[in-house]
Image (tube, grey):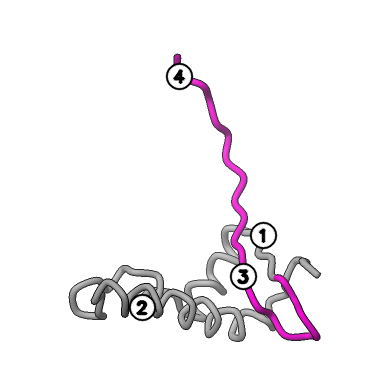
């Protein structure tokens, strides 16, 4: 089931995000030193708390048997066509 997460679930989501992106980092030899802004290294509880509290960013996760298995950040932006 996909549903909006609450603030108390952010630490679990951070672990999931970091572990998921770490597989890509390992594949491309990204490290904390050569790519500190890469998601596997830059996502933290503090960062997501700030986005949740100050940007009112909606955060969703897919839950399977009461454990999250994917986290999706949704941010709606106005888009314009440039033709």
Residue behind mark 4: 82
Percent position of residue 55, x then y:
57, 58
Identify the residue at image location x=81%, y=70%. 1
Distance from Cα at disc 2 to Cα at disc 4: 35 Å
Q: Which residue is mark 3?
A: 71
Residue 21: where, in percent of width, then height?
Answer: 43, 74
**Farthest top residue in view:** 83
- Quote the CA–CA distance across marks 2 and 3: 16 Å
Labels 1 & 3 near each other (Cβ < 8 A): no
Distance from Cα at disc 2 to Cα at disc 1:
22 Å
Residue at x-position 45% and y-position 19%: 82
Secondary structure at numbered mark 4: loop
| Mark 1 surroundings within 10 Å by alpha-carbon count, few (fewer than 14), some (14 through 19), many (20 or more) | some
Give the mark nearest the N terminus, 1 or 3: 1
Tell me the residue that label 1 is attached to: 58
Residue at which label 2 appears: 41
Q: Residue 29's x, y, as percent?
A: 24, 76
Q: Earlier in the sequence, mark 2 or mark 4?
A: 2
Given contact means CB atoms under 8 Å apart, are the residues at marks 2 and 3 in contact? no
Q: Earlier in the sequence, mark 2 or mark 1?
A: 2
Question: Which residue is depicted at the point 55% across and 65% down?
Answer: 51
Secondary structure beneath dot 1 equals strand
What quarter of the picture does the C terminus occupy?
top left
| Comes first in the chain, label 2 or label 3 | 2
Q: Examine the structure image and report whether residue 67 is included in the region drawn in magenta.
A: yes
What segment carries the magenta color? 62-83
Q: Earlier in the sequence, mark 3 or mark 4?
A: 3
Marks 1 and 4 sit apart, C-alpha to C-alpha, by 28 Å
């Amino acid at each position: 089931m996909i549903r909006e997460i609450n603030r108390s679930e952010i630490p679990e989501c951070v672990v999931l995000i970091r572990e998921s992106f770490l597989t890509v980092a390992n594949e491309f030899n990204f490290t904390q030193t050569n790519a500190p802004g890469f998601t596997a290294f830059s996502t933290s509880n503090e960062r997501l708390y700030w986005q949740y509290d100050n940007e009112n960013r909606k955060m969703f996760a897919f839950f399977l048997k009461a454990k999250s298995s994917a986290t999706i950040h949704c941010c709606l932006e106005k888009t314009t066509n440039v033709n």
